[in-house]
Amino acid sequence: MEEAAQLRSKYRHFRVLVIGRANAGKTTLLKAVCGTTEAPQVYNQRGRRITAKKPVLSPTSLRGVHNIEYELRFHSNPGFVFHDSRGFEAGATEELEKVREFINNRAAERSVNKQLHAIWFCIPTDHDARMLTAAELDFFQRCDTGKVPVIVIFTKFDSLDSMAYQELRREGFEHSEAQNRAPRHADEYFKRVHLNRILEQKYPPKGNLCVRKVIKRTVTELLEKTSDALDTNALKLLLVTVQDNNIGLCTKNFVDRQVLASLTRYHFCKPHHIY
């Protein structure tokens, strides 16, 4: 498609900042998005490759040399460029300030290839009591990301299913019935107790996704929510071109673009009556 080719000549990458604590499931998610089981390659600001003794994005990888400016790229899908933030542990403010500075600097970039396009914020749900730290809530209260949309991915959501199952069993439900009811019970509990705490902040995310198990549908839903949150058709098309192996996203964007084009033609071509 000519439009896509012109866009890729201008934009070489779709750039994503990935935020998340240790063991938040970032590695699994990014590998699924890029369709690989291999670790990403890391490059510094000068484009020089950096090697790490431990897998990138692991809890202890690159500790001491971690830099949010470093680019993470997967050989299987070089159209994506990721930046990693280690997330905001309780009481830590240094990383939050680094993230805010990074977002502001990327927003001021004149080069389109260095601009930030989206933020994926991974929050694990396997520790109900500390699911949302004060520092994480502080991000949504203080960090204005401007036109860069934030999508929150609640990972390891099956742990809430297990908790819901145990609660239903205590209420007297049989095993099979408790299993069937658990996912919906977990969803309702999560929305009531946790999700609203983020949505009521000053700068809430543009979308959220609950992930029980990372599968192809998870990737499609994440890319769709990211695409829906982007503010220009050019960026939506860019996301499609770098993830053109995802048929669901390509089909959805093609249909959306065709409907938009049809509505535009209808608006300008229909007869206007004067009363």
Image (cartoon, rainbow, N blue to C red):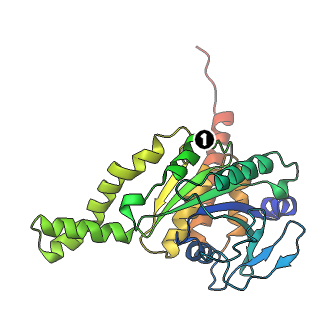
Left or right of 265? Residue 91 is left
**Is the C terminus in the top left, top right, bottom left or bottom right quadrant?**
top right
Residue 144 in the image, given as x and y percentages of width and height: 64, 41
Q: Residues within 10 Å of mark 1 (few under 14, many from 20)?
A: few
**Is the N terminus in the top left, top right, bottom left or bottom right quadrant?**
bottom right
Q: Toward the viewer: 181 or 255?
A: 181
Please state the total of marks drawn on the protein image.
1
Residue 111 in the image, given as x and y percentages of width and height: 88, 53
Left or right of 152? Residue 113 is right
Q: Toward the viewer: 268 or 167?
A: 167
Q: Is residue 255 visible?
A: no
Q: Residue at x 57, y 72 (%)?
A: 29
Outermost residue toward the right? 46
Does dot 1 land on a helix, a strand or a loop?
helix
Left or right of 114? Residue 93 is left
Q: Is residue 119 visible?
A: yes
Residue 130 in the image, given as x and y percentages of width and height: 42, 59
Residue wearing tag 1 = 142
Outermost residue toward the top? 275
Three-letter amino acid code at disc 1? Arg
Q: Residue at x 15, y 70 (%)?
A: 169
- 201 w.r.t. 177: above or below: above
- 64 w.r.t. 69: above or below: below
- 34 w.r.t. 260: above or below: below
Left or right of 129? Residue 244 is right
Q: Toward the viewer: 250 or 56?
A: 56
Quarter of image, res 9? bottom right
Q: Residue at x 50, y 40 (%)?
A: 201
Q: Residue at x 53, y 44 (%)?
A: 204
